[in-house]
Image (cartoon, grey):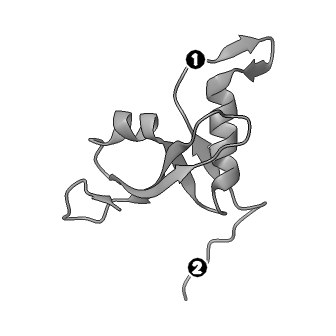
């Protein structure tokens, strides 16, 4: 008999960006938080999207590859941002980016 994993709660979707964050009490805000929030809004259920900065920092990490989602207009952000989808690395392949 096969066991099934059940999802609990709503499916997650994430957007990540790296930069300065302002923290006051239990609040965080600033440009990096705004960009991460806007990128998160572009992601589908179960998807992780990252900014070009995060992709640059993590591009040599094992077990991760990235698919280019292109330049995206982000509400409240002056210029478009390149966004990348995070994919699990298949065994036996190098860290390759897909366009």
Residue at x-position 79% and y-position 20%: 27
Are discs 2 and 1 less than 8 Å apart at CB?
Answer: no
Looking at the rendered image, the quarter that the N terminus falls into is: bottom right
Q: Classify residue 7 by image quadrant.
A: bottom right
Task: Give the side of residue 97 with respect to residue 36, left or right.
Answer: left
Secondary structure, mark 1, is: loop
Residue at x-position 60% and y-position 45%: 15
Q: Classify residue 55 by image quadrant.
A: top left
Residue 5: horizontal and vertical position, in percent?
Answer: 62, 72
Q: Earlier in the sequence, mark 2 or mark 1?
A: 2
What label does residue 3 carry, if any?
A: 2
Q: Are there few (<14), some (14-19), or many (20+) residues within 10 Å of tag 2?
A: few
The answer to whether residue 19 is above or below residue 23 is below
Q: Which residue in the protein does label 1 denote?
A: 20
Residue 45: horizontal and vertical position, in percent?
Answer: 67, 63
Of all residues shown, which one is farthest toward the front? 78
Looking at the rendered image, the quarter that the C terminus falls into is: bottom left
């Amino acid at each position: 008999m096969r066991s099934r994993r059940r999802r609990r709660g709503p499916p997650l979707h994430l957007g990540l960006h790296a930069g300065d964050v302002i923290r006051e009490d239990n609040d965080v805000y600033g440009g990096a938080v705004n960009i991460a929030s806007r990128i998160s809004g572009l992601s589908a259920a179960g998807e992780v999207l990252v900014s070009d900065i995060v992709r640059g920092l993590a591009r040599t990490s094992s077990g991760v590859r990235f698919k280019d989602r292109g330049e995206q207009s982000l509400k409240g952000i002056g210029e478009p941002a390149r966004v990348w989808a995070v994919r699990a690395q298949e065994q036996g392949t190098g860290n390759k980016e897909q366009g």
